[in-house]
Image (spheres, helix red, strand yellow):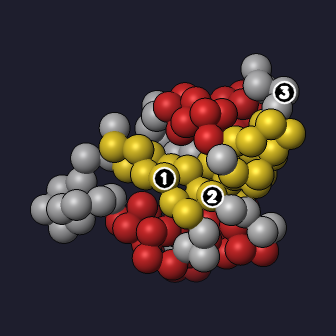
């Protein structure tokens, strides 16, 4: 069992319920679960063509969707992270907050990422702690 679990949620895919359920199964009594979503802002070349308000609205939308996704579970706190690489951002957050487990779901990948999705593969390679990958 784990005391400090980071659950990586992808708000674009409807798979967060399985990840949160798995985290509840793995957490020790009195342990902590933090649901994180990585908001990947548009890169600078795209931002040149976007109004600042559009980018801010996208960020607020991600924040609202994350809160909505976990609002029925009072035992889970949520954090919206920002970074260009979801996998690296998740592993850095987990390390910085002394997580002892990361739970994430992996979609069925294409040929490029045959065994795991690219984010899951990066997290598995670079995490300092245990990683539970759910194939959905």
* Mark 2 and mark 1: Cα distance apart in space: 7 Å
Which type of secondary structure does the marked residue at label 1 adopt?
strand
Rendering coords of residue 95 (x, y %):
71, 74
In this rendering, the answer to whether 50 lies above or below 128 is above
Nearest the camera: 12 or 29?
29
The residue carrying mark 3 is: 74
Question: Few, some or many C-alpha atoms within 10 Å of disc 1 (few <14, some 14-19, many ≥20)?
Answer: some
The residue carrying mark 2 is: 101
Query: Residue at 59% across / 57% down in the picture?
Result: 102
Viewed as shown, does residue 104 lie left or right of 136? right
Quadrant into which the C terminus falls: top left
For marks 3 and 2, the one nearer the N-term is 3
* Mark 3 and mark 2: Cα distance apart in space: 20 Å
Nearest the camera: 125 or 55?
125
* Mark 1 and mark 3: Cα distance apart in space: 22 Å
In this rendering, the answer to whether 8 lies above or below 50 is above
Residue that sits furthest to the top in the current view: 72
How many marks overall?
A: 3
The residue carrying mark 1 is: 132
The image quadrant that residue 78 belongs to is: top right
Q: Is residue 41 visible?
A: no
């Amino acid at each position: 069992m784990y005391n400090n679990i980071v659950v990586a949620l992808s708000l674009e895919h409807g798979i967060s319920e399985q990840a949160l359920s798995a985290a509840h199964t793995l957490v020790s009594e009195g342990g902590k679960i933090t649901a994180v979503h990585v908001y990947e802002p548009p890169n600078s070349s795209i931002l040149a063509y976007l109004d600042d308000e559009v980018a801010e609205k996208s960020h607020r939308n991600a924040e609202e969707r994350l809160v909505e996704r976990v609002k029925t579970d009072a035992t889970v706190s949520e954090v919206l992270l920002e970074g260009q690489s979801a996998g690296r951002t998740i592993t850095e957050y987990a390390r910085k907050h002394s997580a002892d487990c990361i739970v994430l779901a992996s979609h069925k990948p294409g040929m490029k990422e045959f065994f795991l999705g690219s984010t899951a593969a990066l997290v598995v390679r670079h995490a300092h702690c245990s990683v539970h990958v759910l194939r959905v």
